[in-house]
Amino acid sequence: MFASEKVRKFTEKIFKSLGCSTKDAKLAADVLINADLNGVDSHGVARLAGYVRLYDHGRLNPTPNIKIIHETPSTATIDGDRGLGLVVAPYAMQVAKKKAKKVGSGWVSVQNSNHFGIAGYHAALAVSDDMIGWAMTHSAPLVVPTFSKEKLLGTNPIAVAIPADKEPFFLADFATTAVAYGKMEILQRQGKKAPIGWVQDENGDPTDNANAVKEGGGLLPLGGDREHGSHKGYGLGAVVDILSGVLSGANFGPWVPPFATAGFHDVTAQEVGKGTGHFLGAMRIDGFRPKEDFKQNMDIWINRFRSAKHIDDNPVQIPGDQERNFKAEREISGLPLNEKVVESLLELGERFKVKF
């Protein structure tokens, strides 16, 4: 186990070594460490080496000039100037909240950014202002639409954060695929097989090969196959891609640039936009009803669902409970970093003269 605060300080120093400001390095590290604390190991410091590779390949600007390039009272489009998505997305959420405070809701599309970590981190930034937060992003094409052999979509997550009164806030954060690719990377590191329904091979047949995507196959949309509703996962992923890419002026579909750890797939030289895109929103609760009434009703909603009759010894949880349970445990016990992740961090430490 590794103390989260020590890993946080190390991560900050690596980002500063790339040229990031102290403020941006702290923010970027916070997004990654929160992923690990919340049990989302696929999007924590396991990704740090990938951001360094983006920098090495000239795709990451450590000192971006993030700016609004188009706006109305309730909407905006932001150019991230190839900055860390870990920094660009929080900036966009602040813009969304500022607009929501004035007119009730704010919606921001982002172009020319990079991988932004866990979507839930950015959606949750709205909760403290008594707002409902939305965050989504597209990613490199690793996913096959229903009935397709071609990879045309990313795992394209959606996150929604909703405040409550005395209960902790509701946080739904999920990929629009059967599984996030980071989970496949974990299986690869562990030498394990994938459950049937997560991935197909190059011929379009179900497989348990955790390396299938690297070998010409593709991740499956949420649902796995048509009989289990994969067309719904495909539709959700398509909506995220359109809002994050087509609406913002970023690349979209098969033209979304890969994160460094997904660089094995074919990337066409053609571009239809600028970088990677995101879509974020903030909705003022009191734009719909008194916030106190809403938050009290959210407590009732949460407690009713938690008290549902459950199967065996598995109590019903609300979205966000599992992450909070992980965080309570890991803040005490530390982060259970995979051996290969530790090796990559040691290599980064050696390169940048930062002790891990």
Image (cartoon, rainbow, N blue to C red):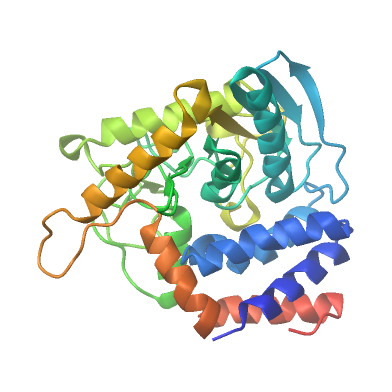
Occupied quadrant, residue 22: bottom right
Q: In the visual, does 83 lie left or right of 101?
A: right
Q: Where is residue 348 in the image (x, y as percent from the top left)?
A: 75, 75
Quadrant position of the C terminus in the picture: bottom right
The residue closer to the viewer here, 121 or 186, is 121
Quadrant including the N terminus:
bottom right
Q: Where is residue 239 in the image (x, y as percent from the top left)?
A: 45, 26
Query: Seen from this angle, which residue lies furthest top?
Result: 72
**Near-viewer residue (37 or 57):** 37
Name above or below for residue 226 compared with residue 316.
above
Asked whether residue 272 appears in the rendered view, the answer is no
Q: Please say if 317 is above or below 177.
A: below
**Viewer-nearest residue: 311 or 343:** 311
What's the residue at 73%, 56% (across, down)? 27
Q: Which residue is drawn at 47% across and 44% down?
A: 142
Say whether residue 281 is left or right of residue 212: right
Residue 68 visible, this orientation: yes
Q: Residue at x 33, y 44 (%)?
A: 220
Q: Which of 1 and 224 is in front in this view?
A: 1
Taking the spot 85% from the left edge, 75% from the top edge, the residue there is 352
Looking at the image, is 33 positioned above or below residue 87?
below
Where on the picture, by quarter, is residue 145? top left
Taking the image as shown, residue 59 lies to the left or right of residue 47, namely right
Task: Residue 208 in the image: state x and y as whole percent.
Answer: 28, 61
Looking at the image, residue 108 lies above or below residue 328: above
Residue 263 at x, y = what percent?
61, 52
